Image: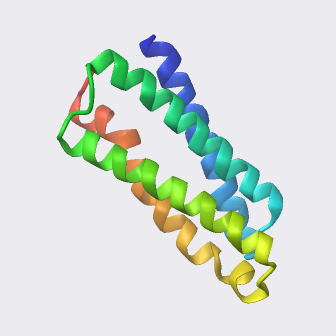
Amino acid sequence: MMQTSSIVITFALVFYSIGVWSERIARELKPWHLIFFWLGFICDTWGTGMMLDMAGGLTFDLHGISGSLAILLMLIHAVWATVVLLRKDTRLIYNFHRYSVIVWAIWLIPYFSPMIFGMQ
């Protein structure tokens, strides 16, 4: 189960990174970016759920707290992107990328913290 959850979380990294960085490079939010935001969120939530089962629940350390925050921010980010695209607000569509990298960077903390702190 550890291997499967690690693979799913890595898919989250790949999907979310594609969405965030392609949006950043394009400097315009497009519907296909949104698909990658949601795929990243789904994989992260799925993989985290598996890891929580193995750990017996949420740990209140840097990894657990930052992981919870990251999932919440990914959800807000994906919902916000959905709303922006549905409203077709040109100003928001072109300025959305400014915040995506911040959410992505915060997401990296729980992704890399087990490697940095030697958690199993």
Q: Is residue 119 above or below residue 60?
A: above
Q: Is residue 62 above or below residue 120?
A: below
Farthest top residue in view: 1
Q: How many marks?
A: 0
Q: Is residue 27 above or below residue 77?
A: below
Residue 71: x and y in percent read 45, 48
Please name the residue shown 53% across and 29% down the image.
46
Please name the residue shown 36% across and 19% down the image.
53
Residue 50: x and y in percent read 44, 21
Farthest left residue in view: 61
Describe the colour scheme in one phrase: rainbow
Quarter of the image that includes the N terminus: top left
Please name the residue shown 32% across and 32% down the image.
115
- Quadrant for residue 86, please give it: bottom right
Residue 58: x and y in percent read 26, 33
Residue 57: x and y in percent read 27, 26
Please name the residue shown 50% across and 36% down the image.
45
Q: Is residue 86 left or right of residue 21?
A: right
- Quadrant for residue 93, please give it: bottom right
- Quadrant for residue 60, please give it: top left
Q: Is residue 113 above or below residue 19?
A: above
Quarter of the image that includes the C terminus: top left
